Amino acid sequence: MARHKRSEHPIGGRFCAVPHKVLDCPAFASLSGAGTRLLLEVMRLYNGNNNGQIHVTLTALKKRGWNSNDTLSRARQELQDRRFIQMTRLPCLPRRGAWYGLTWRPLDYTPEMDLKPVDFVKDSFLLWDEKQND
């Protein structure tokens, strides 16, 4: 039998895959609507080799419909509290924004990070306990 040429994937383009370990954990179930939406935005900003260098700022997300810095800050803090994202570079004035990484992906370390690779806790959202936030 002749081999069939592999056709282009029907989805086409880039996409965000969410692992079941993320979707099934209590931390994900407890996210607010803004927290869930921001997690999807952070996943969208991840390109396969920039984990740990993701900017989660109003400037970066304004064109995606984020208009309130307060809502963004609360959602970002929620993702950090539930350990879906971890800050890898501290913000510093003037004009140096914080960097974040998705904790279920391997860290793409660069020397500009304020975090050592051993301090990046992979899958730390699985350790989140609802009682910690009470």
Image (cartoon, rainbow, N blue to C red):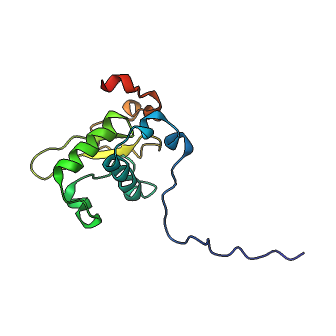
Viewer-proximal residue among 110 and 67: 67
Residue 101, picture quadrant:
top left
* Quadrant in which the C terminus is drawn: top left
Q: In the drawing, does residue 66 fall left or right of residue 118?
A: left
Viewer-proximal residue among 131 and 16: 131
What residue lies at 19% left-to-right and 60% top-to-bottom?
A: 67
Q: Is residue 33 above or below residue 86?
A: below
Say if residue 76 shows up in the picture: yes
The x, y position of residue 121, in whole percent, is: 42, 32
Say if residue 112 shows up in the picture: no
The x, y position of residue 113, in whole percent, is: 29, 42
What residue lies at 28% left-to-right and 44% top-to-bottom?
A: 76
Number of marks in picture: 0
The x, y position of residue 82, in whole percent, is: 36, 35
What residue lies at 51% left-to-right and 50% top-to-bottom?
A: 18
Q: Is residue 13 above or below residue 57?
A: below
The x, y position of residue 36, in whole percent, is: 38, 48
Q: In the drawing, does residue 128 fall left or right of residue 5?
A: left
* Quadrant in which the N terminus is drawn: bottom right
Q: Is residue 6 above or below residue 46?
A: below
Q: In the drawing, does residue 32 fall left or right of residue 126?
A: left
Viewer-proximal residue among 92 and 63: 63
Q: Is residue 95 above or below residue 125?
A: below
Residue 32, picture quadrant:
top left
Q: In the drawing, does residue 3 fall left or right of residue 132?
A: right
What residue lies at 26% left-to-right and 39% top-to-bottom?
A: 77
Give the farthest residue toward the left: 94
